[in-house]
Amino acid sequence: MRTPRVLKILNVSGHKILSLWANGEVRQNDYSKELDSWRQPEMTFYNQLADPSVFGQVIAQDGQFTWPKVQVETDMGRGPKWTPIQFDNFQTYDEGKLIEVRREMQLAKLLFDARKASNLTQYEVAKRSGLTRQTISKIERAEIQIQSDTLITIVTAMGRKLVVA
């Protein structure tokens, strides 16, 4: 299984985070049940997250929920270092409730996977299709909507056929 990666925080309400994942899923994580354990004296860094205004400062960084202003001391053998709190993306994904699947993200992933399976670069697909490499990149990241004629052009440029089920 691919490592789940959070792409974007869509909304934070109280201790609930609505987020968009790289696979096109929108998931909601509710941390209100953890609040009591976060308020324990030995959990000083999580204690800060009990405050909704601090919790609401979450960002998507390195595919994880990250609180840049809430630092924890770590030591990996090279001396202590302060790093932002990050929640494990596997656990975050597994515990999140699926809200919806964004179809445009699924299409983007299909095109990315098809290009990789064809051993083509974005530049090669762009050259064959008459599009720019930047356009191919934006399509693969679902940053732009794709028209059906453009989809057919890209699929053909990869030496593939479009089958609608």
Image (cartoon, rainbow, N blue to C red):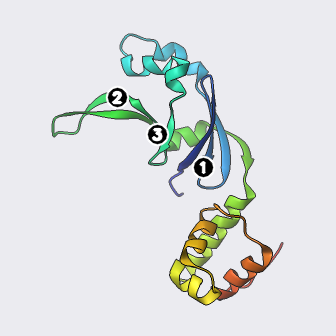
Residue 24's x, y, as percent? 66, 54
Q: Residue at x 47, y 17 (%)?
A: 38
Res 65 visible: yes
63 w.r.t. 45: above or below: below
**Quick one: SS at disc 3?**
loop
Left or right, residue 26 beside residue 2 = right
Q: Residue at x 15, y 40 (%)?
A: 78
Mark 2 or mark 1, earlier in chain = 1
**Quick one: SS at disc 1?**
strand
User: What amino acid is at disc 3?
Assistant: Asp
* Mark carried by residue 69: none
Q: CA distance from mark 3 to mark 1?
A: 14 Å
- Which image quarter is the C terminus in? bottom right
Residue on which the image places disc 3: 88
Say if mark 3 contacts mark 2, CB within 8 Å. no
Mark 3 or mark 2, earlier in chain = 2
Left or right, residue 93 beside residue 97 = left
Q: CA distance from mark 3 to mark 2?
A: 15 Å
User: What amino acid is at disc 1?
Assistant: Trp
Res 120 visible: no
**Residue in front for this viewpoint, 125 or 22:** 125
Q: Residue at x 60, y 66 (%)?
A: 138
Residue 45's x, y, as percent? 38, 21
* Mark carried by residue 71: 2
32 w.r.t. 20: above or below: above
Q: CA distance from mark 2 to mark 1?
A: 24 Å
**Quick one: SS at disc 2?**
strand
**Residue in front for this viewpoint, 43 or 133:** 133
